Image (cartoon, helix red, strand yellow):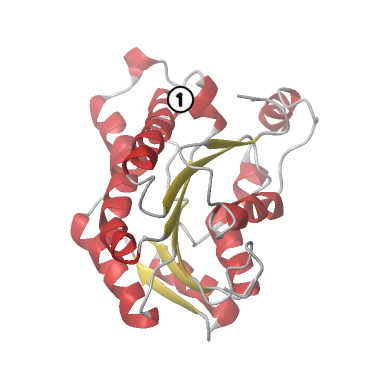
Amino acid sequence: MNGDPCSIVGHTVIVVGAASGIGQAAAKYFAALGAHVVCADVDADAAQLTATHAAETMSAVQTDVTNEESTTALVEHALNRWGRIHALVNCAGISGPLGKRSHEVAPEELDKTYAVNLRGAFLLSRAVLPHMLEHQYGRIAMVSSIAGKEGNPNMVGYSSTKAGLIGMVKGQAKEYAQDGITVNALAPAVIRTPFLDTQPQQVVDYMTSRIPMGRTGTLEEVATMLAWMISPACSFTTGFTFDLSGGRATY
């Protein structure tokens, strides 16, 4: 380490969901900070496009988080490419069924949301933890949501799986607390992503009205928070869910 506890220079970071949005912004930011970044996504072409941002220090691999063999292959790719894994940042997630109350949601729709948002997160951490244990060092950051804290109506699959992700983080953090491994979550509210631009203005206005700061978050703010969470400086905080909601959630 170069003396700066926030430095991730030379660290290898796996970013899952790196094809767009938060994951893409985080991957590019980590690379700019001097990290080696593995850009993983089910969309192989988009992941590769992200990796071209810094070809010498970024690589791309297609990853289906619902498939155990795929998550294992992701870890093997990172080790073969860089020889070490310091951090995992999981941004993979789907919204699941929208605009439906619980009795209108088909079980198969809930199963798919669970498979990506919660089971996928478990498979990723399960794949990377043995390597982190071997080195007695690791940082895991899971991107949850304000919906996991407060629950959003007509989004039962998303809300419940993001809440479950927070519970998983708390449990894993305690399991590995004495192994040099921290496991934390991030709970953003509405973040200004390209997806937000596709939503009706009245929907955006409603979501923004619930944020005391009166604005949406930026991708830069998310990436900056995640960078600290995966740095050596995040050494005495584990099992915590960081708020990134402009004051909407303060617990």
Name the residue nearer the viewer: 141 or 234: 234
The residue at the point 30 percent across, 59 percent down is 133
Task: Name the amino acid, label 1.
Answer: Met
Q: Which residue is mark 1?
A: 155
Question: Residue 81: horizontal and vertical position, in percent?
Answer: 37, 81
In the picture, residue 247 is in which quadrant? top right
Q: Quadrant of the C terminus?
A: top right
- Neighbourhood count class around disc 1 (C-alpha, 10 Å): few under 14, some 14–19, many 20 upward: some
Total marks placed: 1
Question: Residue 223: horizontal and vertical position, in percent?
Answer: 63, 55
The residue at the point 59 percent across, 56 percent down is 233
Residue 5 as seen in the image, left or right of residue 64: right
Residue 181 as seen in the image, left or right of residue 221: left
Name the residue nearer the viewer: 235 or 74: 235
Q: Quadrant of the N terminus?
A: bottom right
- Examine the rendered structure and indicate whether residue 240 appears above or below residue 176: above
